[in-house]
Image: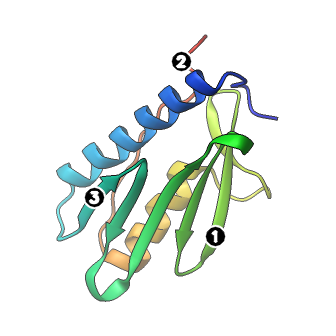
Amino acid sequence: MSSIQAESEFNEAVDAVLLAIEQALEQADGDIDFETVGGILTIDCGGGGKIIINRQTPNREIWLAARSGGFHYRLVGREWADTRGGPALSERLRSVVREQGGVDVMFALPGAEIGS
């Protein structure tokens, strides 16, 4: 179960994650466009398609949609962990951005600092 129970804490945590992703993409050496509208971050990889990251407040999860599939993440301890045991959000995001956008971006995503 997520270590964040209150909706306000969850929204703060997700906002911090989305901001960290945007900042990492801004600093990346590559031609990747992105936009956040209504809490949904869309990363446009041109011919590589789009990557969508959004919050699922009722489940206290972040969802990631990419060509390789859909992935769900829940805050466990200080890490956004895959609910099915796959790589953490930062690792999976690095992988899909590299695969779809041809750019290697390191994502340092905040975890449970909020509300601790």
Q: Position of residue 40 (x, y in %)?
A: 43, 54
Viewer-proximal residue among 7 and 110: 7
Label 3 Cα crowd, 10 Å radius (few <14 / some 14-19 / many 20+) = few
**Amino acid type, mark 2:** Ile
**Amino acid type, mark 1:** Gly
Q: Is 68 situated above or below 77?
A: below
Q: Which residue is labeled 1 in the image?
A: 70
Q: Is 97 situated above or below 88?
A: below
Q: Position of residue 58 (x, y in %)?
A: 71, 42
Q: Which residue is labeled 3 in the image?
A: 35
**Helix, strand, or loop for circle 3?**
strand
Residue at 27% in and 58% down: 35
Residue at 64% in and 41% down: 57
**Helix, strand, or loop for circle 1?**
strand
Q: Position of residue 69 (x, y in %)?
A: 62, 76
| Placement of the C terminus among the 4 image quadrants | top right
Judged left or right of residue 9, residue 110 is left
| Placement of the N terminus among the 4 image quadrants | top right
Q: Is 67 situated above or below 40?
A: below
Q: CA distance from mark 3 to mark 1?
A: 19 Å
Residue at 67% in and 21% down: 6
Q: Earlier in the sequence, mark 3 or mark 2?
A: 3
**Amino acid type, mark 3:** Glu
Label 1 Cα crowd, 10 Å radius (few <14 / some 14-19 / many 20+) = few
**Helix, strand, or loop for circle 2?**
loop
Which quadrant holds residue 112? top right
The number of numbered discs placed on residues in the rendered structure image is: 3
Residue at 36% in and 84% down: 48
Viewer-proximal residue among 10 and 47: 10
Residue 114 is labelled as 2
